[in-house]
C-alpha cells in the first residue's frame, strides 16, 4: 500500500511564510545612468517559500584567505501551485528573498541555486542554495 503524501502538502505550505523569486539572468547590457553592466532577471518561480539552514552547522565553511565563507540552506517551495507543477531548478539560476515575515534582513539578498535535493518522500520541492557570507552585499 502506497503512502498518500497529498494531505501533508498543505500543512507544509502553511510554513512557507516568505516570498522568493528564482530567476535566470538575461543578457548583460550597459546602463549609462549607473555606469555598470546590468542584466534583467527572468523569473522561473515567484511565490511562497521557506528558507532555513540545511543539515548541521558543520556544513558551513569558515572563511580563509583562499575560500570564502558559505552556508548551505534549504529553500522549500510548493510542488505545485493551483495544480501546475513548479519548475525544476538548475545551478545557473539564482534566488532572491522578496519578503520575509520573521527576518526582514533577508529581503533583497541573492542566493546561488546549487541544485534540487532529490527525495522519494517529498511533500515540497527542496532546493539547495548558498550565499557568500564573507561579503556584505546582496
Image: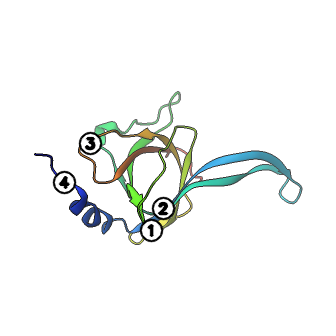
- Give the Cα distance between marks 3 and 4: 29 Å
Q: Quadrant of residue 8?
A: bottom left
Question: Which residue appears at 38% of the width and 69% of the height?
Answer: 17
Q: What is the quadrant of the N terminus in the image?
A: top left
* Image position of 35 (left or right of 99): right
Vertical relation: 20 (above or below) 94: below
For marks 3 and 1, give the one nearer the viewer.
1
SS at circle 1: loop
Label 1 near label 2: C-beta < 8 Å? yes
Label 4 near label 3: C-beta < 8 Å? no
- Give the Cα distance between marks 4 and 2: 34 Å
SS at circle 3: loop
Q: Decide which of tag 3 and tag 1 comes sooner along the chain.
A: 3
The residue pinned by badge 3 equals 56
Pick the residue in front: 34 or 120.
Answer: 120
The residue pinned by badge 1 equals 100
* Image position of 115 (left or right of 39): left
- Give the Cα distance between marks 1 and 4: 31 Å
Q: Farthest residue toward the front?
A: 1
The residue pinned by badge 2 equals 106
The residue pinned by badge 4 equals 4
Question: Which residue appears at 25% of the width and 59% of the height?
Answer: 6
SS at circle 4: loop
- Give the Cα distance between marks 3 and 1: 23 Å
Q: Residues within 10 Å of mark 4 (few under 14, many from 20)?
A: few
Q: What is the quadrant of the C terminus in the image?
A: bottom right
Amino acid at each position: 500500500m502506497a503512502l498518500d503524501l497529498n494531505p501533508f502538502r498543505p500543512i507544509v505550505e502553511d510554513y512557507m511564510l516568505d516570498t522568493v523569486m528564482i530567476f535566470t539572468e538575461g543578457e548583460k547590457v550597459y546602463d549609462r545612468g549607473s555606469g555598470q553592466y546590468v542584466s534583467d532577471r527572468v523569473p522561473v518561480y515567484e511565490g511562497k517559500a521557506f528558507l532555513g539552514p540545511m543539515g548541521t552547522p558543520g556544513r558551513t565553511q569558515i572563511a580563509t584567505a583562499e575560500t570564502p565563507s558559505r552556508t548551505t540552506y534549504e529553500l522549500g517551495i510548493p510542488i505545485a501551485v493551483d495544480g501546475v507543477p513548479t519548475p525544476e531548478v538548475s545551478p545557473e539560476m539564482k534566488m532572491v528573498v522578496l519578503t520575509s515575515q520573521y527576518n526582514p534582513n533577508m529581503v533583497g539578498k541573492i542566493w546561488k541555486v546549487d541544485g534540487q535535493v532529490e527525495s522519494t518522500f517529498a511533500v515540497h520541492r527542496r532546493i539547495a542554495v548558498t550565499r557568500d557570507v564573507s561579503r556584505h552585499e546582496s
